[in-house]
């Protein structure tokens, strides 16, 4: 069952940069798709179009059957349904780990506080940070902050999660703990689109590997075929 469908997506920035050329991709529910390719090939731009952080110049994108460009589509709701984890964790510095995870369900969804708090604690437990939920971001390592950021995305109960180079800003010794959390999510059936340079993760976790070059999606393979044809 297709959850995210991109068809003939083109993106030309105002400066004339043609960042995406005719990109088509189906992402099925429960699937992990890893996007790789050289710097500047359009990976991040493509990811950002999937939750409307970037508009597209032409083509169409559907999330769970809803066409993003339809006038009646609630873009804020779609952003809740497709979460995004960035390279820089972007936590609120004046909120604790728990406060960061609780914030959007409370303020955006206006849900009941006790319920949100319990779910947030469960999520922090799931990413291995139960004991640090009262810590402010400045007292957490990069790897811990990124795990809080993942928990924060999960707090919105998204249908899919997009990861834009989630380990690129981390010291090498912290990459593993973040990838382990991502592997756990994949096992639990989360639909994930991951831009990363971590080939071990791609080989081990991806259902499909997509290669981008100069704005085009040039190759789409199973990891077995992708890594054996290199
Ligand atoms: P990647 O994620 O593969 O490194 P990007 O999607 O970040 O590539 O960038 C693709 C191309 O689009 C690059 O040439 C980049 O310079 C350009 N680009 C990205 N964002 C913008 C922007 N806001 N305005 C103009 N050009 C941009
Ligand atoms: P705020 O910035 O709104 O004060 P915090 O980030 O301090 O929020 O905390 C958010 C919620 O988490 C509050 O309801 C607070 O009671 C609870 N909380 C904060 N730290 C802990 C902790 N170590 N153990 C249990 N609950 C906590």
Image: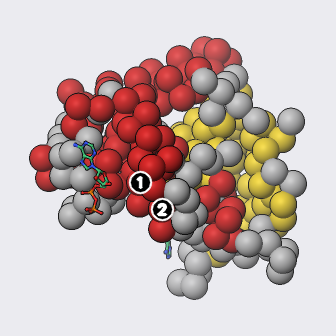
* Residue 95 image point, x, y percent: 25, 59
Q: In the visual, does 224 lie left or right of 121? A: right
Query: In which quadrant will I find the N terminus?
Result: top right
Identify which residue, 144 or 223, lies in the foreground: 144
Q: Residues within 10 Å of mark 2 (few under 14, many from 20)?
A: some
Identify which residue, 13 or 73, lies in the foreground: 73
* Figure disc tally: 2
Report the residue at 60% width, 46% height from top: 157
Secondary structure state at the residue bearing disc 2 = helix
* Residue 72 image point, x, y percent: 84, 77
Q: Which residue is mark 1?
A: 102
Which label number is shown at residue 131?
none
Residue 191 can be seen, yes or no:
yes
* Residue 229 image point, x, y percent: 63, 19
* Residue 77 image point, x, y percent: 68, 65
**Quarter-of-image position of residue 207:** top right
Where 104 sits versus 204, above or below?
below
Identify which residue, 1 or 198, lies in the foreground: 1
In the picture as drawn, the residue positioned furthest to the left comes out as 139
What separation in Å lies between label 1 and label 2 (alpha carbons)?
Answer: 6 Å
Report the residue at 59% width, 20% height from top: 187
Q: Which residue is mark 2?
A: 106
Q: Is mark 1 within 8 Å of ligand 2?
A: yes
Q: In the visual, does 75 lie left or right of 39? A: right
Secondary structure state at the residue bearing disc 1 = helix
Q: In the visual, does 22 lie left or right of 17? A: right
Query: Pointer 1 and pointer 2: residues touching (CB < 8 Å)?
Result: yes
Report the residue at 29% width, 33% height from top: 129
Q: Residues within 10 Å of mark 1 (few under 14, many from 20)?
A: many
């Amino acid at each position: 069952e297709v959850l995210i469908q991109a068809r003939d997506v083109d993106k030309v920035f105002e400066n004339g940069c043609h960042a995406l050329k005719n990109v088509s991709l189906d992402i099925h529910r429960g699937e992990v798709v890893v996007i790789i390719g050289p710097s500047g090939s359009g990976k991040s731009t493509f990811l950002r179009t999937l939750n409307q952080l970037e508009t597209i110049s032409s083509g169409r994108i559907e999330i769970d059957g809803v066409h993003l460009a339809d006038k009646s589509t609630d873009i804020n709701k779609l952003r809740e349904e497709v979460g995004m984890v960035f390279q820089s964790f972007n936590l609120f510095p004046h909120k604790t780990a728990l406060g960061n995870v609780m914030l959007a369900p409370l303020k955006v969804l206006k849900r009941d506080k006790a319920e949100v708090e319990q779910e947030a604690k469960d999520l922090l437990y799931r990413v291995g940070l139960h004991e640090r939920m009262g810590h402010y971001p400045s007292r957490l390592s990069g790897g811990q902050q990124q795990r809080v950021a993942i928990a924060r995305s999960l707090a919105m109960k998204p249908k899919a999660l997009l990861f834009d180079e989630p380990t690129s800003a981390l010291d090498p010794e912290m990459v593993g703990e973040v990838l382990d959390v991502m592997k756990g999510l994949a096992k639990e059936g989360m639909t994930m689109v991951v831009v990363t340079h971590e080939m071990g993760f791609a080989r081990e976790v991806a259902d499909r590997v997509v290669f981008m070059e100069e704005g085009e999606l040039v190759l789409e393979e199973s990891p077995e075929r992708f890594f054996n044809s290199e």
